[in-house]
Amino acid sequence: MSIIYVLIPIAILFVAIGLLIFFWAVRSKQFDDLDKEGFSILFDEQKKKQRQDHDTDA
Amino acid sequence: MPSALSCFHCQLPIPPETQFFTDIDGTPQQFCCAGCQAVAQTIMAQGLGDYYRFRTKAAGRAELVPDELRAQLKSYDNPDVLAEISDSTTQGQRIELSVNGMSCAACAWLIEKQLSQQAGVQQVHVNSGTARCELVWQPAQVQLSALLEQLSQLGYQAAPFVPDQEEQSFKNELNAYLRRLAVSGIMSMQVMMLAFGLYFGEFSGIEAQYEGYLRWVSLLMTLPVMAYAARPFFTSAWRALHSRELNMDVPISLALLYTFFASVYATVFDTGEVYYESVCMFVFLLQLGKFFEFRARKRARDATSNLLKVLPVSATLLQDDQPVATSARKLVAGQHILVKAGETIPADGEVVAGNSSTDESMLTGEYSPVAKRVGDMVMAGSINHDGILTVRVAHALTESRLGQIIRLQQETLHQKPAILQQTDKIARFFVQRLLVIATLTFISWYFFIDAERAFWVTLSVLVATCPCALSLATPTAITCALAQLNKQGILIKNQHVLAFLPKLTQVFFDKTGTLTQGRFSIAKVNLYQAGWTEQAALGLIAALERHSEHPIARAFANYETPDVVASDITLQIGQGLTASWQQQQVKVGSRAFCQALDITDTAQVVLQVDDVLIASVELADQLRPEVPALVQQLQQAGLKTSILTGDGSGHGELLARELNITEVYQGCSPEQKVSTIQQAVSAGETVLMIGDGINDSPCFHAAQVSVALDSGTELSKNQADVVLLHNDLAQLQQLLAGARQAQAVVRQNLWWAAGYNLVIVPLAVCGFVSPYIAVIGMSFSSILVVSNSLRLLNK
């Protein structure tokens, strides 16, 4: 069971990293408009596909 | 989905005999107007057809970009104006725009895409929730007017916007809420996980070293929750104590600190129980409730805060008889400015040339257009209707009547009648007794019963009576009520409204635009020639009036028929129109214009064909259809109703007689409106003010509750506590009903929380409640309170 002396600090480290990423996301305005971000995935996929189409055309 | 008969772009029905077709992805699609067609063509040409695939709502009907708009946009390129509406950053000029015509998230994407394709644009960020666009661009490479024109080609009207300071602080606050929520939420999960290890250890045995280790780790992870996420509770409690008050945050802080330090004590000295998971969960749940409430309020605020749109931004200055665009704020007394038709007048001043009529209803409440000739004074913020005016500036914008009203409104801002929150009253009652009981428990156990258990029994008392349910009782109910009213189209920006509404005693109505529709409609048509029907006369008037910008002309818009076509139309500013129709000369205009002074009635519009009097039309600003029923209902509910209007024409008195309202205040300046309401408030009334104009906005702060209509001016919506989005006064009833329901639920919640405490406290004092049972009881009563509040959402 002494493995928890290693595993729990590692878990805490991950939690800290997760929190830092969240803070960064808040600061970079990713939570300002949640409606739009839900859509961005649809549009981005389309854009890449178009680019590929262009590549094959060329 | 677009059907054969609805416009491909805006999905409104297509009028018969319109032929606007464009190929979209190989299939011909029909449009309702040239505007929508042009927008769709632009969108497809830019390769942005995805918009039509992914949008969830139809677009607004688009208008063709008129040349006047182009000219108006050009004025934003002037360095003076630009410096005022945007700021320089290292990447380029940064500006915030408020965008009209956005209906769903796909619009945001469309705007971002279109603008970021332009050379010189560094950054575009569109928020679909608030309809704002943040733009960073290089003025050297591309002009702002060009970018704004691009947007209007897509069917969106963008205007520069300067967010007020309060809004910025709201934004920062919301982000702080998000961060605190993340810290308390994520830490709760971790600590809960460790707590499970400890729970199982209780039952199946755990080695002392592991138990101690898990406790220390839990302590470590609870620290950020206490030090960061829970800090607002501590600071608010400290502020209250400092001013010798007690609010709800005092018992919350007390319970948090006591539970936390008891757990730390247990951890350090390896005795008793730890409650880190309770601490974390408690903070998380409280933060969650506050976060939702705050976000609802922020949305309501953002939706209505376009203050700067009221203040004219740019002006056309005449320098050596040459028109030069300049910033409206830079105008000084003595300068000459040019005001075109449809423009907002940028400064108070005297007309030195030109002839027109202006709409001052926003400032005075007077709805009839005011004729302006050489020598007349015009007011900043009023709208020039039909002619071109040259105006000598009398004083700068900040000294103008508009500036004064805005200052008055800022002065009244802090005079809002305060209400002591119900929960604060309860908190005061509760905390005093709780502290006494806890102290007595500790003393009696320590000295008379069992000194060993004194600390832990006191902890049970504090945990069992933990104000969780009590503190959740009001905010959850209010949040749910806000969400429910929001769904019905009632936007509430100030949650105190719900506390005031059930106590309401008096309602003040503004007249123009609130009780009435704020625009002319046809009251009566008098016919003078046989063979003419009302329909035919109105159709002919409409065919001419569509060429006029005058507000009277709008009254006829519904009577337009496509088979009546008038040609050779000439406009006599402020008088009327002439045209030829079926080889006859037609005149539409005032009695003086048609030389029909012999008519005795009060008709404003006269129709003549070949100098023969055909018809005269009486116009009136008519009552909103829902008003009589509403006023009657309010009076039956025992509320005093009063009319408070800036209009001094006596129309208000007529209206009051019609509605059976006894109290009428006519011809009030904004200052008089404020003092009238302040008198009512100091006489002990709980006052609701409902209005729509700029002149109403100062007195909004004087009343306990202020309501604006969505059709009202931006400033009034910005300042009101409540905005009725459907422009339906009958919603006032819904608002009152919603507030009463919320109050009922709050009462139930408080009774439950109080009843629970009454049962559990004696048990805890006697030592029958172990801290674990206390935690379960506390969680159960919290869940009950939250579920009870959620019932409001289903109503």
Image (spheres, rainbow, N blue to C red):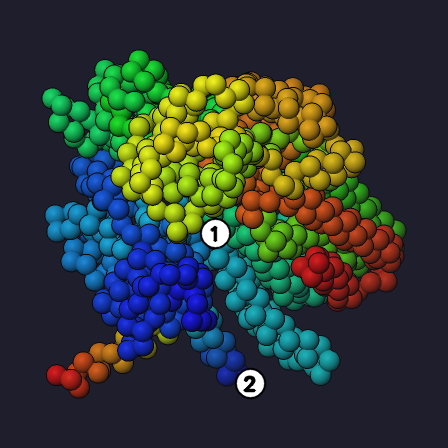
Decide: is B521 above or below B685.
Answer: below
In the rendered image, the quadrant that contains the C terminus of chain B is bottom right
Direction from residue B61 to residue A56 in the image, left or right? left
The answer to whether residue B477 is visible is yes
The answer to whether residue B83 is visible is no
The residue at 44%/61% (across/down) is B12
Residue at image mark 2: A1
The residue at 13%/23% (across/down) is B321
What label sits on residue B647 in the rendered view? none
Q: Amino acid at mark 2?
A: Met
The residue at 23%/66% (across/down) is B46
Query: Chain under label 1?
Result: B
From the viewer's perspective, is the residue at label 1 or at label 2 nearer?
1
x and y percentages locating residue B309 in the rendered image: 37, 38
The residue at 33%/63% (across/down) is B19
Query: Chain under label 2?
Result: A
Where on the picture, by quarter, is residue B9? bottom left
Q: For numbered disc 1, what is the local secondary structure?
A: helix
10 Å crowding of disc 2: few (<14), some (14-19), many (20+): few
x and y percentages locating residue B628 in the rendered image: 69, 37
10 Å crowding of disc 1: few (<14), some (14-19), many (20+): many
Q: Residue furthest top?
A: B375
Q: Amino acid at mark 1?
A: Leu
What label sits on residue B174 in the rendered view? 1
Decide: is B43 above or below B146.
Answer: below
Query: In terms of depth relative to the viewer, which is nearer, B625 or B156?
Result: B625
Direction from residue B752 to residue B83 in the image, left or right? left
